[in-house]
Image (tube, rainbow, N blue to C red):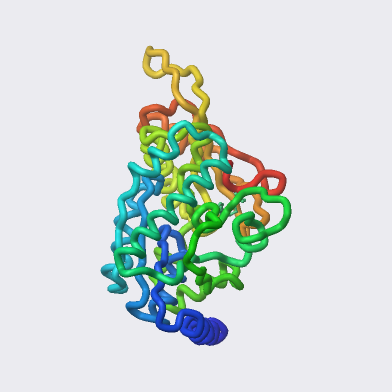
Amino acid sequence: DWTMAAYREEAIEKIRKQVGDGKVICGLSGGVDSSVAAVLIHEAIGDQLTCVYVDHGLMRLNESEEVVGLFRDHYNIPLVHVDASETFLGALEGISDPEKKRKTIGGLFIDVFEEEAKKIGGADFLAQGTLYPDVIESVSAIGGPSVTIKSHHNVGGLPERMNMKLVEPLRELFKDEVRALGRELGLPQSFIGRHPFPGPGLAIRIPGEITREKADTLRKADAIYIEEIKNAGLYDEIWQAFSVLLPVNTVGVMGDERTYEAVLALRAVTSTDGMTADYYPFDHAFLGRVATRIINEVKGVNRVVYDVTSKPPGTIEWE
Ligand code: XMP
């Protein structure tokens, strides 16, 4: 579409002007926004860009393979894949406050980016896929409204001490426009259509303390939920669907054994920009099918509930 073609050209000019012959590090999260930002910036400045994909141990199932595959194989854009799961999960040990989680993760992201920047002889800029709604809704770290609901930034709350300047070519766009730009740039539909995924990842979908074991349980359950949504042909109707592993155990019965395991909450919402949202009215048979599969197939979960809160008053993520 012509508007996006024009936007693309303008954005490329702007990036070139801002960056000059400087070097840019772009953090890839697996989401649409950072992917579109990276492809756009690569088009503007080529190998002055280094993409860094940080696996913090809180990604979805198979996420790493998919992202690395897209960039290395589809685009031939060089990508550094950092497995930092030990570091992130270690630092998050014992933390259950949502803002503390976000700030811890944001700080570690910057550590990783700065380390990678050093390896390429220094970088002047950090690129992010920040969108317009992120700018309005957040952000203590970049000076948002006076009431901070969540430090939600693309990397979950950037520390002040960061010494790279930000490149944010999507700052004026809404999600649907980013998807149009992604199409214009030739990203595969499988990528463009993906549900949004927050920078802090599964950390904010595990209320209470995070452990690797809980993250594994959540990943398995969530993959089943998303698979069922896709099988039912509902994925594209839904803005975002995901599971939340609650820090609550309940009593159940399996065969003739007593169980005492965690509750999993399912969330699905419709929205146009993430700023307001309605819960998705699944039919009960669908929910029952998902619950049965998860309880049968995922060790550690014996009860499934569905979240019927819209935004406001709820937020989309639980933390
Ligand atoms: P909430 O939970 O605030 O979320 O209603 C609105 C949208 O933003 C996403 N979100 C984030 N995205 N970094 C991101 O890149 C974050 O720290 C973050 N926190 C929330 C959320 O998934 C939803 O799409």
Residue at 43% across / 28% down in the picture? 301
Out of 59 and 186, give the one closest to the viewer: 59
**Is residue 135 left or right of 22 when viewed as pictured?**
right
Name above or below for residue 106 compared with residue 73: above
Residue at 57% across / 66% down in the picture? 131
Query: Can residue 284 be seen here?
Result: yes
Out of 223 and 113, give the one closest to the viewer: 113
**Is residue 152 left or right of 224 when viewed as pictured?**
right
Name above or below for residue 208 compared with residue 58: above
**Is residue 150 left or right of 188 when viewed as pictured?**
right
Name above or below for residue 299 compared with residue 171: above
**Is residue 313 left or right of 271 when viewed as pictured?**
right
**Quarter that holds the C terminus:** top right
Return the x and y of residue 106 as percentages of the image width and height: 49, 51
Return the x and y of residue 111 as percentages of the image width and height: 41, 54
Picture quadrant where residue 299 is located: top left
Residue at 39% across / 81% down in the picture? 45
Query: Can residue 272 be seen here?
Result: no
Return the x and y of residue 188 as percentages of the image width and height: 38, 70
Return the x and y of residue 185 as percentages of the image width and height: 43, 78
Picture quadrant where residue 177 is located: bottom right
Out of 285 and 50, give the one closest to the viewer: 50
Tally the numbered discs: 0
Residue at 33% across / 42% down in the picture? 86
Out of 258 and 214, give the one closest to the viewer: 214
